[in-house]
Every structure is written in structure tokens, then in C-alpha cells.
Image: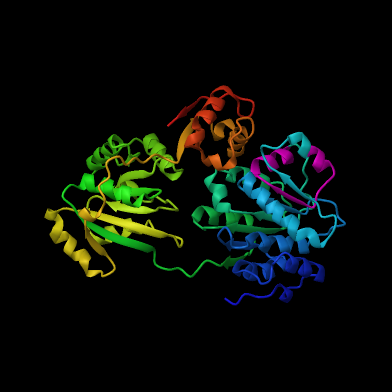
Amino acid sequence: MNLSNFSKLPLTQEMLTNLDNLGYKTMTAIQAEALPAVLQGRDIMAEAKTGSGKTAAFGIGLLHNLDVKKFRVQSLILCPTRELADQVAKELRRLARFRHNIKILMLTGGDSFGKQLGSLAHQAHIVVGTPGRVLKHLNKESLSLENLNTFVLDEADRMLDMGFMEEVEAIMAFLPPKRQTLLFSATYDNEVKEVATKLLENPAIVKVTEAEKPNDIEEIFYACEDKRETLVKVLAHFQAKNSILFTNTKLQAQELSEYLISRKIDALALHGDLEQYERNDVLVQFANGSTPILVATDVAARGLDIKELAMVLNYDLPHTQETYTHRIGRTGRAGAKGVAVTLYESFELEKVEAYKKDAKRSFLDEKQLLDVKSFEMKPEFVTLVIEGGKKDKLRAGDILGALSGEAGLEGKDIGKIDIYARQAYVAVATPQIEKAYAYLKKGKIKNRKFSVWML
């Protein structure tokens, strides 16, 4: 795509001069695709990665359409974290320099509610906030969206990961029916599409990621004498952030996970003998980074959707090449590079021959891997289970507010939040887990005490 100059858009000379002063010389792909539709007042469903220039893609549009003399909230931007909201608000303030008296207000958890009440009393043109705090102000009627023209949902996929869609849907009830809605997401799975269907009306579809390419996967087959020892060497060599390790039987999955734990390598097993609640616990922990390795059978892993999987390990050769393709296709998605490692012993040589027809695959000897005696693998996060959920009207914003407020954790220390009917799961960075656990054991969420424990 040829990147265009901002002067081709119907913007004021004051805004064009400010953009030039800020270093906005040519439009990025997302800006060139989205801005014309945004300026026309159309709804947008945009797929764009962080760092693509999406803040300016919606920010320039909503600032252009702003009536500065009308001192009411005309635009609301929802972000999944306080840090992103702060980043968006700062960029909007830079973009707004072309015109005096544009007031941009942040409403996020962790900041004084009373201070925010005072700021809202003096009104604002644009509000940037997190779902929980924005909803609290709406319920207390300290924030009015009667004059809203533009609603922006930024990083919708992350919003889903953190369990915020219940709050977003509650906020939707306060939005005027006639408005422009701009939805941005790094990925568009079925959950995000469902949200888009509820929010958008005849949207312009903008996708600036590269055309769909085959997954970028490095495929390596290692001949070995002892699969267990070779497996540890592979894990030490690649040190992948997360991996699914496939076995052909339930017993093998369970035994292998126990073996890895005995070697100080954190792992969980997923197989058909698990009760549903045990399966949920395992999947939550793997999805939120509380265990780096999932040892699974093909049946148990069916339908499993992990957005960013660094490595697939075939501990057992699959029964068919179709199964092999399905297994390794879970890594190397969305432009990321993936690794697929398959282990085989001498008695499996005949089966391996069929895989050698693909020239891009490498066939190596495990002796080429370094022998590691003291390799350990610990999780990035630990999962806390809270004995409260949707039935208790507990929302992700309540948990996030408790941990980032009185408990004093930073947003980067709080990972994925999953809320079910009677329980909530929150991933906390391993170095901060004791601090978070101690607070939740003694402190309160929404002025209520809940039982809590670590998985």
C-alpha cells in the first residue's frame, strides 16, 4: 500500500500543521485505511497490532469532529488497562494541540474517585478510561453520555482476555443509539466478532495485517535414545514461553507431566480422565501463563484456542500426518514464528520416513543438543482463585481495582482475569503473588470478604 499524506484528508490547516510539527509526515497503513471512514462518521471494525498508529487513526477523527464550544462528553475511549489509557490520553493531548480548550479526562481504577468527581463536575470533551471505573461513574450518574458522538473500544481482544466484556455490555446500555462506534483489536476471533455484532452497524472492515500466510513454523525431528532426557534438552535449548506437549495416551500425559515436575519444570496434564472443574483449572492456568507447559492428548486438546503458542512438542509421533499438521498448526500464528519439535526413537524410523518428503523439515540427532543438568522452568504468573463470581456481581474491574489500588500492584503485575458463575481466577506475576494473596486474604473486594487460594 502507498502511504498517503495527511493533507489528502479533509482536515483543518491547524490540525495539519500540528500533525507535521508532531512528526506525522505520512499515514501508516491503519491510518490510511481507517481515517477516511472515521471522518465520514462510519462505524469501524479494525484489526491492527500495537504500534501500528491506531491511536492517531481514531484520535484524529474524533478530534476533527469535536464541537469544542459544546462542553459535554462527546467521545468515550475504553481501554483494558490503566497504562494503555494513560498512553492513549497523552497521545490525544498531543494531537489536540491544534485547538485551545479541548479537555481530555482519564477515568481509571487506582486513582482517587473523589478527585475524578471534581473533574467531571467541570465537564470534559473526551473521556479515556477503563471499564470498571467508567461504569461506576455512570451508575452514580457522575458521568453522562447523552451528548456522546463517538465510542471507541481499544484492544477488544485484551478486554476479553481480562474478563471485561460484562462491564462493556453494561456501559453499552448508557450509550445513545445514534453514535459512531470504532472497534480496534489485534486479533479477530469469534468472541471479538460477537462483540462487534452487538456494537457496530454496517461497519467499514479494516485489516492492515499482512495477507494471510501459512504459519511460520520451524519443524525439527530429533532422533533420540531416551525421549525423556531429550525432551528436557529441547526445553532447555529453546526456552519457549509456552508449549503444548502431545502424547498419544492419557496415562502417558499424566506420567510425563509428573516427570517434568520432578525435574523442576512446571507442567500440567490435560486428558480425558479429568473432571470438568479440573480441566477448567488446567486450561485457565495455561491460558494465563501460570504454567508454561501443557501435556495433552489430541482428544483433550480439541477445540483448544491459545492465541500465542511458542512451541509444539510431539513426544509421541501422531497416528496420521493429518494429525501432525493439526498439532503443529497451533503455533506460528498471527505473524509470529513458531517451533514444532518431534521426538522419535529407532523403532519409529519407518514412520518417520514419510515425514522426510517435506524438504523444509530438519532431521537432527539429539547429541547436537547441549546436556543441561540444572535446567528449571518456572511460570511467569501464579493463579489466585477467588470464591466469588458473576452470581456475586463480581467483575474483573473490581478485582483489578482492589489489586492495583490498596494492594499497590502495577497493571503489568496483573494478568488475565476469568470470571465464572461462582469463582474468579486472576493471574498475578510470580514475584508479586505473596503480596496479592496476603491482601486478598485480609482485604475486601467491593467491601466484601471472599475466600481466596492459590492454584
Closest to the observer: 131 or 410? 410
Q: Which residue occupies 38% across, 57% down?
A: 331
- Taking the image as shown, residue 345 lies to the left or right of residue 157, namely left
Q: Residue furthest left?
A: 347
State whether the magenta stretch is mostly helix, strand or loop: helix
**Could you say which is closer to the camera, residue 446 or residue 264?**
264
Asked whether the viewer can see residue 319, the reply is: no
- Specify the farthest residue to the right: 69
Could you say which quadrant of the image residue 52 lies in? bottom right
Query: Is 36 in the magenta?
Result: no
* Extreme residue in the top direction: 442
Where does the image place residue 63, in percent across and percent down from the top left?
A: 76, 61
Residue 360 visible to the viewer: yes
On the rendered structure, is 70 left or right of 432?
A: right
- Snapshot colouring: rainbow
The quadrant of the rendering that contains the N terminus is bottom right
Q: Quadrant of residue 111?
A: top right
Identified at 72% across, 76% down, the residue is 8
Number of marks? 0
Residues in magenta, as a range: 117-139
* Picture coordinates of residue 172, whole percent (x, y): 67, 48
Q: Quadrant of residue 335?
A: bottom left
Q: Which quarter of the image is occupied by the C terminus?
A: top left
| Residue 64 % position (x, y) | 77, 64
Along the viewing direction, whichever of 392 and 229 lies nearer the viewer: 229
Q: Position of residue 189 (x, y in %)?
A: 49, 56
